[in-house]
Amino acid sequence: MFSSNSKGLLLSERALFLLFTFIGCLFCYYLQSALNIPAYVASALVGFLGSLLPSSYFVNTKQLIACIYTGSFSAMCSQSFFTSSIDILILGILTGVFYITFANYFRGFGGKLGTIGFLSSLSFVFLKGLL
Amino acid sequence: MNFSYYLVSSFMASATYLLIKSTDHTPTRVSSTLSLIGFGGLYLIHQFTPIDFHSLASLIFGASFVGMCSHKKINIGEILFGSLVFAALFDFLDPVSYQVGGALGFSAFVSIVLVWSSSKVVSHLKTLILSR
């Protein structure tokens, strides 16, 4: 269903990436805000739980796991930046867009997902400042 | 200068790198699992002796990103140097204090790209000198 060479991503693939980055963001945010877990523990927990996703013939599971982990990185922002539930949705979408744009660059370099998360949360913080 | 940062960072990065290389697990699983084990270990140590738990836990988490490199592109020597650069960045810039998500991953990425490009330049210079 999905090509492993994701230079020409399918629409359904992009939608899945957006969904999974949002899920990563949401869970990490929830663990931090509701359960008062430190950001690094929340992100590692989300990454670990995400990595338990069963592999599928139809979907590139490794990419989806990477999406979840990237989403959790961007949600490591200070909680003071999140004033409403819409904020986490905006951050999730931003992360998904950045992931889709940059996932094919710098393959094999550690910290790539964190960099995408960093760009997303930085954009989110700037956007919040502008609005 | 906190020497324990350099030690912890190089241990965590090389452990992540070697585990990814030798097992079938995804880099995400290895990084998150090792980080969680590291947090648990730190928590236990923290019960007996006073340590800066939050800084060391953040360092452990960030250093695991340095180790998430592909073994086809980056060798263990570059990982070790990268982890030292990461520890230095962590020590002097304190990326966690900026309160922006992904700062640790970005620092890890900068460290590893810096080491990788330096090693490419050095090997290129070596070839140039030897060919003369």
Image (cartoon, coloured by chain):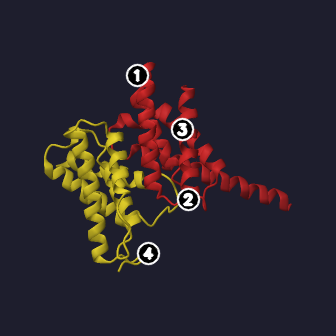
Chain colours: A yellow, B red
Quadrant of the rendered image containing residue A67: bottom left
Q: Position of residue A78 (x, y in %)?
A: 27, 39
Q: Badge 4 sits on which subunit?
A: A
Kindly indicate whether the residues beneath marks 1 and 3 are on one polypeptide chain: yes
Q: Badge 2 sits on which subunit?
A: B
Q: CA distance from mark 4 to mark 2?
A: 17 Å
Q: CA distance from mark 1 to mark 4?
A: 47 Å
Q: Amino acid under label 4? A: Ser
Q: Badge 3 sits on which subunit?
A: B
- Give the quadrant of the C terminus of chain B: bottom right
Name the residue beneath numbered marker 2. B70
Mark 3 surroundings: few (<14), some (14-19) or many (≥20) residues within 10 A: many
Q: Is residue B32 left or right of residue A20?
A: right
Pointer 1 or 3: first along the chain: 3
Q: Nearer the viewer, residue A119 or B50?
A: B50
Quadrant of the rendered image containing residue A15: bottom left
- Give the quadrant of the N terminus of chain B: top right
Q: Amino acid under label 3? A: Ser
As drawn, the residue found furthest toward the bottom would be: A1
Q: CA distance from mark 3 to mark 4?
A: 33 Å
Contact, CB < 8 Å: mark 1 with mark 2?
no
Q: Which mark is residue A4?
A: 4
Q: CA distance from mark 1 to mark 3?
A: 22 Å
Name the residue beneath numbered marker 1. B47
Q: Mark 3: which secondary structure?
A: helix
